[in-house]
Amino acid sequence: MTALPPRLAYSVCMTHFYEPRLGHGLKHDPFNAIVGPRPIGWVSTRSAEGVLNLAPYSFFNAFNYVPPLIGFSSIGRKDSLNNIEATGEFVWNLVTRPLAEAMNQTCEAVPPEVDEFALAGLTPAPSRLLSGCWRARSASNAAARKSCRCRTCRATRSTPGWSLAR
């Protein structure tokens, strides 16, 4: 019998299994590392009161070409979700390395009346396509932006043994 090269033998022997509902015993949840790379959905919205919001979402992606469909998942109810449900509009902004620090600043949990554009030192730009009276703004610094109208928001149901409330 031929021995496996050391590198291959290591990868064959290192298997980790867990049932998410029972926990994984690791410092960080491996699901986030396994499902990757993932683009960051830097979602900008405007509240019904006119307050701008900008927040990153790591569970974001494109789902269709024609018609172009994108979506993201919010863990818990956040300002972005509330604003999208109220106005039906949002803008997805591409996060590139030069914007990484600003994006990290928009991760902060702040009250709904705080403008994350101002918090991160970013300049909001009007959307060219959204015509609603509350018009979501895009980050003018972003290399790419996609103006979006919400077609549906869905609440995920819990799996037995899990709680979706946070």
Image (cartoon, rainbow, N blue to C red):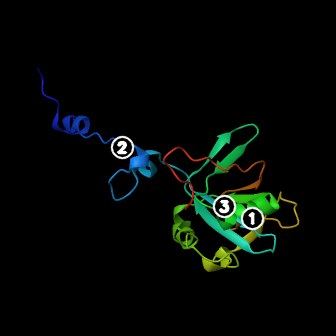
**Residue that mark 1 sits on:** 83
Under tag 2, what secondary structure? Answer: loop
47 and 130: which is toward the camera: 47
* Distance in Å between CA atoms under marks 3 and 2: 32 Å
**Residue 141 in sight here:** no
**Residue that mark 2 sits on:** 18
Residue 43 is labelled as: 3
Answer few, some or many: residues within 10 Å of disc 3's Cα (few below 14, many 20 plus, some between 14 and 19).
many
- In the rendered image, residue 21, in percent from the top left (x then y), is placed at 43, 47
Residue 56 shown left or right of residue 49 in the figure: left
Residue 89 shown left or right of residue 57 in the figure: right
91 and 17: which is toward the camera: 17
Answer few, some or many: residues within 10 Å of disc 1's Cα (few below 14, many 20 plus, some between 14 and 19).
many
Instruction: Check contact, mark 1 vs mark 2: CB within 8 A.
Output: no
- Work out whether 3 lies above or below 151: above
Residue type pointed to by label 1: Asn
Answer few, some or many: residues within 10 Å of disc 2's Cα (few below 14, many 20 plus, some between 14 and 19).
few
